[in-house]
Amino acid sequence: MIEPALRSLRVERDDAGEVSLQSVLLTPVLLTLVLLVVQMALWLHAVQIADNAAADGVDVARRYHATDGDGAAAAEDFVSGSHSQLLGNATVSRQGNRVVVTIGVHVPQIVPGWPTSVHRSASGPIEEFVAEPRR
């Protein structure tokens, strides 16, 4: 007798479609997170390439009798030789006895609103010949 009374108190739930609803709501969130991780990795890769390209450009531009074009070409060659789809343009300026190389690298955009370029600079002293009596 108690058993039929308990059956009448139970509320039967219909779970049909709950998993589909959860999948529909969760899938876009997970895909967005995956795309954000990929975009962050692309951006960090571009930062690393730009830093190294600027440093390489400074190493070449600061040499004795080197020109600004030599440093810019070295930085751009580093970007193009990095086996990636990145495009970079470098500028070289001389300020007193220092040389500054600035490079901008284009970052592929997967997530809208993410920065599409990275700009990095490096500087170093210009090498100069010092005669023996001046040392």
Image (tube, rainbow, N blue to C red):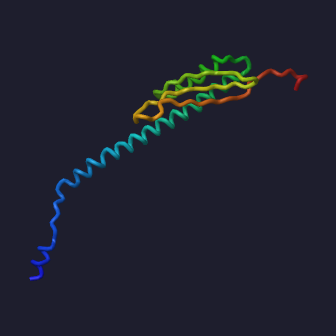
Q: Residue at x 30, y 49 (%)?
A: 26
The residue lying toward the viewer, choosing from 53 and 8, is: 8
Report which quarter residue 5 is drawn in: bottom left
Q: Residue at x 23, y 54 (%)?
A: 19
Q: Residue furthest bottom?
A: 1
List x then y, in percent, for residue 27: 30, 46
Q: Residue furthest right?
A: 133
Residue 130 in the figure: left or right of residue 63:
right
Q: Please say if 3 is above or below 71.
A: below
Q: Residue at x 16, y 60 (%)?
A: 14
Q: Residue at x 54, y 34 (%)?
A: 47
List x then y, in percent, for residue 36: 42, 41
Q: Quadrant of the C terminus?
A: top right
Q: Quadrant of the N terminus?
A: bottom left
The residue lying toward the viewer, choosing from 39 and 59, is: 39
The residue lying toward the viewer, choosing from 57 and 96, is: 96
Residue 84 in the figure: left or right of residue 124:
left
List x then y, in percent, for residue 61: 67, 22
The number of callouts visible is 0
Residue 94 in the figure: left or right of residue 81:
right
Q: Please say if 9 is above or below 51.
A: below
List x then y, in percent, for residue 59: 67, 26
Report which quarter residue 33 is drawn in: top left
